[in-house]
Amino acid sequence: MNLKNYIRSIPDYPKKGILFRDITTLIKDENAFAETINQIVERSKKFKFTKIAAIESRGFVFASAVSFVLKKPFIMLRKKNKLPADVHSVDFELEYGTATIEVHKDSINEKDEVLIIDDLIATGGTAEAAAKLVEVSKGKVAAFVFVINLFDLGGSANLVKSNYKVENLIEFPGH
């Protein structure tokens, strides 16, 4: 199954000049969604990890299903002020603004090796912030798995240059 066929491209969203890669068309098809989860599970088996983390919000869709299949704890990396207990926070730059993500302080510890899953990597700012959250929590990043890599925006390559392991299922140009 060619998963690329299930990704909708929307020009000028969320702002002019951005070509948005929409995964809603992938997840609404039960066969494409199942194939996506199966591929993430298979690629994840290359790595040693104790927990799975995902970046809010589309990463949750994939990571929770993978967590269920692999019987691994699932950690939510959330937007600022969405978690009720004590948190670690990391600020970062986006293509079109700035943001903060957080994790509960008791979610990750020094014994944890964390697989980070997200729907897409573009410039890599959010992924780098997720890695920092894991590391601030004293955990280790086992690897990243993305459904989509926008290869010409450099995020995946930057993660590899920073010595992170990276897998992706499909690639598109960013523009």
Image: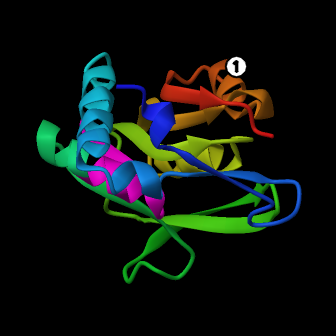
Tell me the quarter of the picture where residue 91 sits.
bottom right
Which residue is depicted at the point 82% across and 62% down? 96
Q: Residue furthest right?
A: 17
Residue 75 in which image quadrant: bottom left
From the viewer's perspective, is residue 78 above or below residue 80? above
Judge by depth and name the residue closer to the eye, 9 or 156: 9
> Residue 122 lies in magenta, yes or no?
no
Where residue 73 appears, x then y in whole percent?
Answer: 20, 50
Residue shown at the point (54%, 36%) measured from the top left: 148
Image location (x, y in percent) of residue 127:
59, 44
Q: In this view, which residue lies farthest toward the front? A: 5
Decide if residue 1 is on the left or right side of residue 64: right
Quarter the N terminus occupies: top left
Q: Is residue 76 visible?
A: yes
Q: Quadrant of the C terminus?
A: top right
Numbered marks: total: 1
Secondary-structure class at tag 1: helix
Q: Measuring 31% from the left and 16% from the top, which residue is drawn there?
A: 46
| Residue 103: percent from left, percent from top | 44, 63
**Residue at point 88%, 62% (across, down):** 16
* Label 1, residues with CA under 10 Å away: few <14, some 14-19, many ≥20: few
Q: Is residue 51 magenta?
A: yes
Between 68 and 38, the residue placed more toward the observer is 38
Q: Going by the image, does 20 lie left or right of 137?
A: right
Q: Would residue 146 be seen by someone viewing this image from the given angle?
A: no
> What kind of residue is marked 1?
Lys
Q: Which residues are magenta?
A: 49-64
Q: Is residue 164 left or right of residue 85?
A: right
Q: Circle 1 sits on which residue? A: 161
